[in-house]
Amino acid sequence: MRNNNHLSFPWPLLSFWVRRILIAWFLIAFWIFLFQIIVCGIVHDNEKVKAFLQYIEVLPAFVKALLGGEALQFGNIAGLIAIGYQEPFILLLFMLFAVGVPTALLAGEAQKGNMELILSRQVTKTHVYICTALITVTGMAALVLVMFMGTVVATNLYEFDQKVPLYSFFILAINGGFLASTAGGIALLSAACFQRTTAVSLTIAFLVINYIVNIVATWWPSMKWLYPATIFCYVGDPKIFTETAWPLADMGVLATLLITSTILGGIIWQRRDLPL
Amino acid sequence: MKAIEINSLTKVYGKSRGVENLSFDITSGEIFGYLGPNGSGKTTTIRCLMGLLRPTTGYCNILSKRIMHGRATQHARIGYLPGDFRIWPGRTARKSLDLMARLGNSDNVSERRNELADRLDLDLDRKISALSKGNRQKAGIIFAFQHQPEVLILDEPTIGIDPLIRQVVMELIREAAHDGATVLLSSHDLSEVAAVCERAAILREGRLVELSSISKIVQQGQRQLKVWFIKDSNIDDVTKELPDGIRIIQHDSNSLHISYNGTSDKALKWLAKFPVDRITTPETSLENAFIQYYQKEGGHEK
């Protein structure tokens, strides 16, 4: 009977959960990194780029929208490299992490019965929530850095006849990180409210609807008014490349969504009975 | 000193009832039995005590501290075994138990853990997924006992465990109480509750219907007599003249097993009409008392 009743942050839980998701994180990071190299490898060659541009020009508008919409400037290298930041496959990888981690750690552990054991030790529900949020946001930020590093490495591997504005790509990556973290916040909110399957389904539904609305609004001029309603509206402002400006307003909107959903999720998680 | 206090505790799940207006205390060092059939509210009470459920009204105190929902109140001093012990299947029992100990600020428990594993005959280095149900339960028992808690809250601790190890678990509970720990033991196995507990509470449909010493609960049950009649005597009429309040448990050609409430006077006067060879008084068990209590309270034999 020599137990320390002092309530401290559960670092062992945080480190255990980090180790649990590390393999998944590395796999996602590897593909994101590799994809940037592949994109740069394709677009650095002038002849191939010209052929690619001609091909893109004849594609329907919605396909251009799928490739990145307004942010893309097919006439220059930077616009083409930016495809690697906005292509659906990359978004899917980011969303996989953003949705998978909070739902696996909050709703998943609760559903498997482990949460009852965790919460029977010196761990509060707030601790558990903070651990999940920290892993989601930090993991997402690290993925964004990996994506940017992919571009940096690729620009050193290949020669480009135009200067590649790396700083603009850094801004774009951070902006993208805010978008992905916002998706993580929505997933966190869902995981705090529902069982794992429901939480994953709802978050994916939210993202898919946003993505479809984004494409429709980009492609169909009369639906352009819908554009600000999607979270994808707040990423890839062309000014990032034309003026090397930080899209502070866009990042502000995403940060507000992230903070609101995270706080709301935290309140609901705190008030809910366990096990689910 | 009261180690556990439950005061007017009510928990309602939407429209359905969990527990209703429960109040009882458990003294330090006491082993307290918590009985009731499935769905009677035992696990709900335990989860309220652990701060996993938010009471609708009322409150619980453990070691003089009010339990706050989700705040891990006094958890470093509590050993908890849930009714359905599940833990990461891909990890070894040792690693999972070590993580759980560190989450409770109990770092130096490996010696105690090994000792418990030896006594319970559990290989801690096997993955949880490779363990049988009984062995997983043993891991759960180590989880509850490894940090030598001051309060043990055990929900069905011997479920799925063989009789030999069950005895070890009972010994562990007695030893913990001997060292000053308070034990709340929820169990369906009434013989083990009778063997280790001083007092018990009985729950029915979320309400406390009995709270007293085990001996008193047993006494409140129906008494029994087993009667053997003289060989070749005619006892065909014995069941036809059965007085009110006496129930036949078993009957064959020359013996009779009956139960009754109150004094033995009426039963003996009735039996005196027949050629009795000998009479024994089988001991009423807690199980009999419990079953009879439910039959009585449930309205079947009112």
Image (cartoon, rainbow, N blue to C red):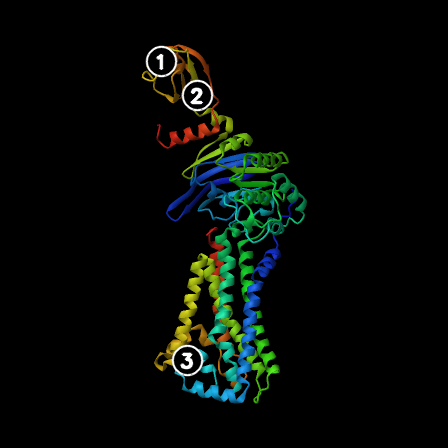
Chain letter of disc 3 in the image: A
Q: Is residue A146 visible?
A: yes
Q: CA distance from mark 2 to mark 3?
A: 86 Å
Residue at image mark 1 = B235
Q: Nearer the viewer, mark 2 or mark 3?
A: 3
Q: For the residue labelled by badge 2, is the local secondary structure a helix, a strand or a loop? A: strand
In this view of the protein, which residue sits in the foreground, B105 or B282? Answer: B282
Q: Residue furthest left?
A: B240
Q: Please state the horizontal and vertical placement of residue A203, each as a whole percent of the image.
A: 44, 65
Residue at image mark 2 = B224
Q: Is residue B25 above or below residue A206?
A: above
Q: Is residue B248 above or below residue A238?
A: above
Name which quarter of the figure residue B198 lies in.
top right
Q: Is residue B13 left or right of residue B131?
A: left
Q: CA distance from mark 2 to mark 1?
A: 19 Å
Q: Please state the horizontal and vertical placement of residue B129, each as a whole percent of the image.
A: 54, 50
Residue at image mark 3 = A63
Label 3 amino acid?
Answer: Val
